[in-house]
Structure formats: C-alpha cells, structure tokens
Image: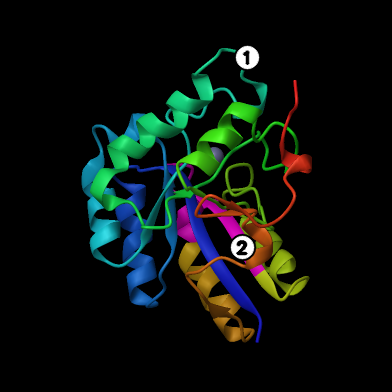
Amino acid sequence: MKTITLTFDNGPDPVVTPQVLDVLSQHSIQSTFFVLGDKLRDRRAATVRAHAEGHWVGNHTFNHIVPLGMASEVSFSRSEILRTAALIDDLAHSRKFFRPFGGGGNLDKRLLNTEALEVLLAEKFTCVLWNAIPQDWAYPRNWVDRAMQLCRQQNETLMVLHDLPTGAMDRLDTFIRQAKDEGFTFEQDFPAACVPIECGVLRHPVDAILTTN
Ligand SMILES: [Zn+2]
C-alpha cells in the first residue's frame, strides 16, 4: 500500500493554518506542522488548535532566514533551534521533531552545520527530512499535478507543503481527493528513510546534509 505523509512548513498563519486544519479534519488526516518560532510568538492559536486536533508540532528554526549549514556565527544554530523549542513548549511531540531548511527544498549541505548537529544529538531531537517537494509556493495553482507525480514514483512519500498565504492551500482538498481516488493512504508518521536522527540517535549518515566548514 502506497502512503503519503503530509507536513506543513513555515507557519503558523492565522488564516491559512485553520483553513488547512479544516480540510485535514474533513478527511480525518493527521499531519505535522513545522513552525517558525518567530511566527509562533504571536500566532499561537492556530498551532494550539493543530495540537489539540492530534497533529504533531515540529521545529523549523526561529526565523528561517539563514540555513544552519550556511551560518558562521557561533551559537547561531543553537539559538535558532533552542529558542524555537522553548516557544513550542508544551505543544512539542515527545520525539522533538526538527526540520532543517536549505532553500528551494534541496537536500544538501546547507541544511546543517556541526553546531546544529551537536545540538540535535545532545538535546535528543528527531531530524525529519522529506522526499517530495511539489513547490506549492512557486506553483500555487497547479502544484497538485506535480505532487501526484511525485507520489506515484515511490511507495512512501513524505511531502512538504506550506501553510502560507500563497493560495496553494485552496487546492489541498483537490489533492487529497485525487490521492485517495488513486488508492493512496495517509499516514502521520514519517518514512524511516527520511529520519536521519531519531531522539538524538544517528540512524543514517548525515554527510550529504552537513557542511563541515
Ligand atoms: Zn521551510
């Protein structure tokens, strides 16, 4: 059986996040929201609702400006991760999900630096990557076809979407209906291949996503 795990990055958004939650609820789908600390500070209500409805809340850095693999300042990565973790607080999953970013959805050495890796291991985070980026931000009107193509290519899809006001989430219901019609099932947990660090334990090599500069 082919599965799809949905994740929503870069929120919360006071309008789009509740819109996404409404659609997921109609389809009884559970997902994960990888939030930015800077947004969570004054937009907590949508994330509180997501948590209350059984969705998982993960950490996606504080302000999502400099990828941690490109950070040169000492303590920058530590701060981006731990400041956001403190804001997520009691909404966090016990596995402490963290998702890095690089820009454009590429899985490359921009994702982590050694300081970030040390924090993730020492503080027992679970690092969650992805294997499908339909670029909903760039193609808000026709990302669904791209998303379906990605799902057909693999048995376990971990998809990154964005609860941002681009208009893309107006198509979420269409995507879910089409995927269900084609026989996909939706799972909340992540394919193991997309989780290089589980609760502070290294499961897969991280060389490809770690800068050594
Ligand atoms: Zn992101």
Q: Amino acid at mark 1?
A: Ser
Q: Residue at x 47, y 70 (%)?
A: 188
Q: Nearer the viewer, mark 2 or mark 1?
A: 1
Q: Residue at x 28, y 59 (%)?
A: 51
Task: Tell me residue 112's x, y (percent).
Answer: 64, 34
CB-based contact (under 8 Å), mark 2 and mark 1: no
| Magenta stretch contains residue 39 | no
The earlier-in-sequence mark between 2 and 1 is 1
Q: Residue at x 40, y 32 (%)?
A: 82
**Element at badge 2?**
strand
Task: Tell me residue 191's x, y (percent).
Answer: 62, 67
| Res. 205 mark | none
Which quadrant would residue 146 be assigned to in this image? bottom right
| Magenta stretch contains residue 160 | yes
Q: Quadrant of ligand 1?
A: top right
Q: Amino acid at mark 2?
A: Leu
Task: Tell me residue 158's x, y (percent).
Answer: 61, 62
Residue occupied by mark 2: 158
Nearer to me, 67 or 72 = 72
Where's the C terminus, which quadrant? top right
Could you give the CA–CA distance between mark 2 and mark 1, rounded to whole angstroms? Answer: 30 Å
Q: Is residue 78 above or below residue 105?
A: above
Residue occupied by mark 1: 72
Determine whether, in the image, residue 30 is placed left or right of residue 210: left
Residue range highlighted in magenta: 157-171
Task: Tell me residue 117's x, y (percent).
Answer: 60, 36
